[in-house]
Structure formats: structure tokens, C-alpha cells
Amino acid sequence: MSKQIHTTDAIIIGAGPVALFAVFELGLLDIKAHLIDILDRPGGQCAELYPEKPIYDIPALPVVSGQQLTDQLMAQIKPFHPTFHFSQMAEKMEKIATGWRVTTDAGTVIEARVVVIAAGGGSFIPKKPPISNIGDYEGTSVFYAVRQRESFRGKNLLIAGGGDSALDWTINLQPLAKSLTLVHRRDEFRAAPHSVAQMHQLAAEGKIKFVVGNLTGLKGADGKLAAAVVSDQDVACDTLLAFYGLTMKLGPVATFGIGMKDHLIPVNTENFETDIPGVFAIGDINWYPGKLKLILSGFHEAALMAQKAFRYVHPERKWRFEYTTSSTGLQKKLGVKD
């Protein structure tokens, strides 16, 4: 039996916030999209790594969690009926007469005029402490991300790390935990100074403990943690959150024939097209002079990308930029009533 081939206007590799906003910008220009993501749900890093962590630099939203931002983006793109292919990895990209064909590792085949790579930094894998038996506790007592903060309520929590994630969750989980200890190998941090100051204040008030040392071992049985070994001393805990950073794996995208620079995709800043016509890269995965890895920057890139994608998808149409506030046609698409 021959495989079903899906046809659409744009293939978006990734389903994080920037990819979701790209659906909106493309949709305004009558460009339909299929999205491919290795995760089993939309949201990318926001949903996988920090669904409840507050984000402060989204315009008009003083504070929003990663999951809330994802939910609101999904509501925003609902009028454009995007198609999602979750739990799949874009494995191969081929040039065809009508544009591009992308095949996933699940055998899904999609053809479109343009391809938009919005895969963040690729697949992120947490760096783990160098402890031989850590796998015995993963998923029950040892975690590398906070997906539901309530699951840490009443825990004797040990947080290990010295970056923003470690400090932010020390501050945010302290009110929920029965006890909380922060461990870092030195009394210097890579986190925001304000967060460091807040942590030291909590320690001075006796609300948390801060221990300088190296996490070298875990003690417990049957997946239940009893203590962590920190520089040859036992620190009692029943739950460990380890924030040692992430390892980026770009995956098959690196084999697509696109020009690369230090595991990123160079683009121009006019429309964020790669060195291959009809293939774009937006969000954390791209590179250009002055690049800032912010969701805000990715939203800007998605808007300009969509304008150039329009010329590939609808070459017969005269391009005319319209404001959503004044175009009755756009308001109709969005289901907005006068």
C-alpha cells in the first residue's frame, strides 16, 4: 500500500511558541500549515521544561507561565485549523517540483511550497550529575524539570545547580516544600543577581539551606531517595531537582543540506530565509549578527518570514500588507465581529 501524502502550503518543523505564532502570521496570508514536533503536545521548551515557570518579557503580559502562553497561542491560531504531527521527528527533506517533501521517522509524508524550521535548539536533553545509580531514582525521586509545582508540595527538596532554573525554582518552590536545600559547587552563580539576592535572603531567614559542595552520590532504596551525598556529607532529602543545564541535539535537521554555523542555521534579517530558497529558520535555531534568543525576537522573525513565504505560496496574487485592526477581511478570518 502506498503511503498517504499530506499536501499543504507550509511545513513547520517544531511546535513551540515561535512555531505557533508562525501559524498565525501565515494564516493571516491564507497559508495553511502542518507542524511536526518530537514532543507529544504543543509548546516546545515552554511546555516540556518550564510549564509553570513565570515568563516576564512577553508584550502586554506582565507575567505568564510557559503553559499559559502555549494555551493562548493555541487559542489564537484556532481559526486557521493547523494540522499537528506529534511524537515525530522530521527525518528527511527533499526538493520536489512543487516545493518540498518532508518525511518523518514515523513515515508521515508532507509536501508544501515552503518549509519553516522552528525547532528551537533541537531536542534538549538534560545534563545529569555524574552519579552511577541516578537512573534508579529518575521519575520517582529525581527530576530535571518542574512540570507541576504542586507535586513538590510537602517534600524535603534538594535543588542542585547554579543557573537561573536552579535559583528561580528555589525561590518559587520554597513556600511549597517542607524543607529546601540548594546545593552548588561554589558561592558564585550564573543566575540573575536579583534571584541570587532573594536566595541569600531566604537562607538568612532560615527558610532554606544553602550548601556549597559537589553532589557526588545518592542514598535510598526502591527508587525512594533518603539522602544525597554532598562533598562526603549526607544531606537528608526525599526529592532531587538537578539543574545542570541542557545538551542540544539538532538531529536530522543538520543533514538537510542547509548551511550551518556552530550548530545553528544562518539566515538573512530581511525575511529569515536560509541559503536554500523556500526554506526558512526562525527562533532559537537560527543565527544572524545581533541575534537574541528571546521568544519576543522569534515572534518578529515569524512575521517577516510569513511575508516572504506568501510570495512562494501565492505567486499569482498581488501582495498587500494589511493591519488586522482595519482589514474587514482579516477580521472575518479571525471571527471578529464589528
Image: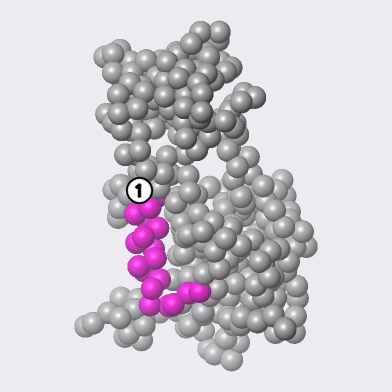
Q: Is residue 95 above or below residue 315?
A: above
- Residue 9 rendering spot, x and y as whole percentages: 58, 80
Would you say residue 275 sits in the magenta stretch? Answer: no
- Residue 69 rendering spot, x and y as whole percentages: 37, 55
- Residue 71 rendering spot, x and y as whole percentages: 36, 60
Q: Is residue 277 above or below residue 143?
A: below
Residue 179 sits in quarter? top left
Q: Residue at x 55, y 68 (%)?
A: 85
Task: Name the amino acid, label 1.
Answer: Ser
Towards the viewer: 8 or 178: 178
Q: Residue at x 26, y 14 (%)?
A: 205
Label 1: state its secondary structure. strand
Towards the viewer: 143 or 64: 143
Residue 21 sits in quarter? bottom left
Q: Residues within 10 Å of mark 1 (few under 14, many from 20)?
A: some
Q: Which residue is mark 1?
A: 65
Query: Residue 313 vs residue 180: left or right?
Result: right
Q: Which residues are magenta?
A: 65-83
Question: Outermost residue toward the front?
Answer: 222
Question: Outermost residue toward the left?
Answer: 338
